[in-house]
Image (cartoon, grey):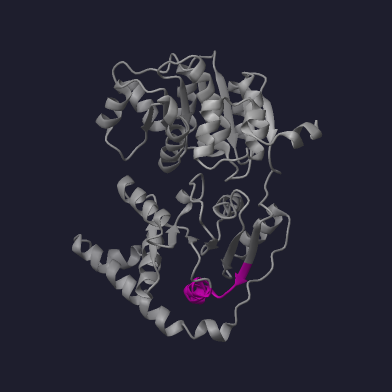
Amino acid sequence: MEEDKEEVKSFKDLGVCDQLIEACDNLGWKHPSKIQAEAIPHALEGKDLIGLAQTGSGKTGAFALPILQALLETPQAFFACVLSPTRELAIQIAEQFEALGSGIGVKCAVLVGGVDNVQQSIALGKRPHIVVATPGRLLDHLSNTKGFSLRTIKFLVLDEADRLLNEDFEKAIDELLSVIPRERNTYLYSATMTKKVRKLQRACLRNPVKIEAASKYSTVDSLKQQYLFVPAKHKNCYLVYILSEKSGSTSMVFTRTCDSTGLLAQMLRNLGLRAIPISGHMTQAKRLGALNKFKAGECNILVCTDVASRGLDIPSVDMVINYDIPSNSKDYIHRVGRTARAGRSGVAISIVSQYELEWYIQIEKLIGKKLPMFPAQEEEVLMLLERVTEAKRIADMTALGFFVRLGISLKFAVENLSIY
């Protein structure tokens, strides 16, 4: 069996048809990734799949190609439904379906919150082949959009299933499964195998083939991981020092709260760094705008919450910085998975304060390795202190001014600025 796997060198070997091979070629996909090589032959045989793979491993292609090939054989509207936990990931999945299906006229509809319902209803009225949705908005359309149902779907995909099964989505997923035909193919993809994912697997998959393209909680070998143990009061200084030392890099800086993304990005801009924030508090249009500026290279530092740690395909990220250490150590895996994707190298640096040491120790336990320290001379770092303190003060005053313009009291504003 191992020898057979070694011989698989092209999408043709996997059974993918010529039209889709051409689409892969146009996207620069010369060879299938590990998850694609293992999943596609089973999917083309009509089997249900549960796929465990590291983020950035090519999961979307692993389920999109078999679905599009089946659609070519039996064209129909509302052929497949893909569920995603975030708006950005849903949009990205639809873009990949459209890119792979551009030569065969594939139509997609994206149903997510933060976008006008009427526009989405019009898109559904055009009878798309593929519906990509977040669970809540999909339920909304099933209840309120005349003539729309999922009675004819042949494929259901649950992407990032471990996140789809948190408290926010669990009830919606149960409702959706009750109105979707039992006679279908189901693909369940997840970075981690949790108890809830196992339960869902038993409930909605028929004799699935399990494909594990990575160990349970691991980071890729091409990722260089380091940490810095610093006093909380000097975190900003160390962040600026790292970004200055690696000034040519494209970086994602992860924070814990939505408020701190804006404040931190403003502080960095005050120091002449090209930073832009993205968080769940922003409108969908602003989130996509920030993402597009980052992808286009207008800004090379994206300051974000965990809304950006899963599923977003930003291929050119050189470095991930954990400004705040995640309290859930599994989130570390997803954050650092933004870099060192598809065989490229990358760097992940965690800035650990005295208050976060316990969380950091849990991360090292999870990944099964002790990380080396990032080399930083304290004297050099603290030379930045005056400039960084002033940049932070200006950022805080800008935020206070914004609150006051909104008619919010100064006392309330100060109490609610997370950086104070």
Residue 105 shown left or right of residue 18 in the figure? left
Residue 48 showing in the rendered view:
no
**Residue 197 rendering spot, x and y as whole percentages:** 61, 33
**Residue 109 rendering spot, x and y as whole percentages:** 37, 29
Residue 41 shown left or right of residue 129 in the figure? right
Q: Nearer the viewer, residue 249 or 266?
A: 249
Q: Majority secondary structure of the magenta segment?
A: helix
Q: Residue at x 32, y 75 (%)?
A: 394
From this view, report whether residue 305 is shown above or below residue 397: above
From this view, report whether residue 33 is shown above or below residue 397: above
Residue 145 within the segment the image draws in magenta: no
**Residue 28 rendering spot, x and y as whole percentages:** 53, 43
Q: Which residues are magenta?
A: 227-245
From this view, report whether residue 61 is shown above or below residue 394: above
Q: Nearer the viewer, residue 11 or 324?
A: 11
Residue 234 within the segment the image draws in magenta: yes
Residue 129 shown left or right of residue 239 in the figure? left
